[in-house]
Image (tube, grey):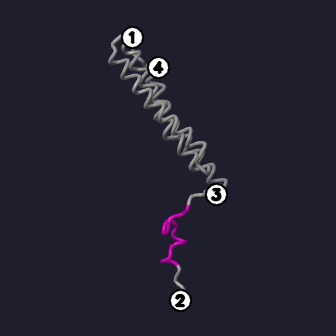
């Protein structure tokens, strides 16, 4: 096998492992559900995608087309955002509170412009 392809696949796996580690640390360290939901859906999707891309490189070097890896990558990139959206909608429906501060002016009812006492 070509050493350039092996080194490229190894580099992609290391980058993917970094994203997976960031997603795992974010899942453990972030304070509330909404923030915890953001970390694994973004970082872990990139991590899994990187591992699958490295697998496609190795399979192509061995003469296999890598169709299975391509389908898995497409499935992960489609289902992760959809499942995160459904989890967030369920949390909103249950009125799960967030610890994130609300920026001024983000909610029209709370903005100082609407606090006219005349």
Q: Position of residue 39 (x, y in %)?
A: 53, 43
Q: Earlier in the sequence, mark 3 or mark 1?
A: 1
- Find the magenta span and give its range: 101-114
Residue carrying label 2: 118
Alpha carbon distance from label 1 to label 2: 77 Å
Q: Which of labels 1 and 2 is toward the front? A: 1
Residue 87 drawn above or below residue 11: below
Q: Quadrant of residue 74?
A: top left
Image location of residue 19, percent across then percent down:
47, 36
Q: Looking at the image, which residue sits at the far right?
A: 94
Alpha carbons under labels 4 and 3: distance apart: 41 Å
Could you tell me which quadrant the N terminus lies in?
top left
Q: Which residue is mark 1?
A: 62
Q: Check if mark 2's residue and mark 4's residue have beta carbons within 8 Å.
A: no
Tell me which label, 3 or 2, sits earlier in the chain: 3
Magenta-span inclusion, residue 103: yes
For residue 97, the mark is: 3
Instruction: Find the distance from the CA under tag 3 to the CA under tag 1.
Output: 51 Å
Name which of mark 2 and mark 4 comes first in the sequence: 4
- Lower sequence index among marks 1 and 2: 1
Residue beneath disc 4: 68
Q: Is the residue 118 above or below the residue 111 in the image?
A: below
Decide if residue 104 is on the left or right side of residue 87.
left
- Name the side, left or right, on which 61 lies relative to 96: left
Give the mark, 4 or 3, whose residue is nearer the N terminus.
4
């Amino acid at each position: 096998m070509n050493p350039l392809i092996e080194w490229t696949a190894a580099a992609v796996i290391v980058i993917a492992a970094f994203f997976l580690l960031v997603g795992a640390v974010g899942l453990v360290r972030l304070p509330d559900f909404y923030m915890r939901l953001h970390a694994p859906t973004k970082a872990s999707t990139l991590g899994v995608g990187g591992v699958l891309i490295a697998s496609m490189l190795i399979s192509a070097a061995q003469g296999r087309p890598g169709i299975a890896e391509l389908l898995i990558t497409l499935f992960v990139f489609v289902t992760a955002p959809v499942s995160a959206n459904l989890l967030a909608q369920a949390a909103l429906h249950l009125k799960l509170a967030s610890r994130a501060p609300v920026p001024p002016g983000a909610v029209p009812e709370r903005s100082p412009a609407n606090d006219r006492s005349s």
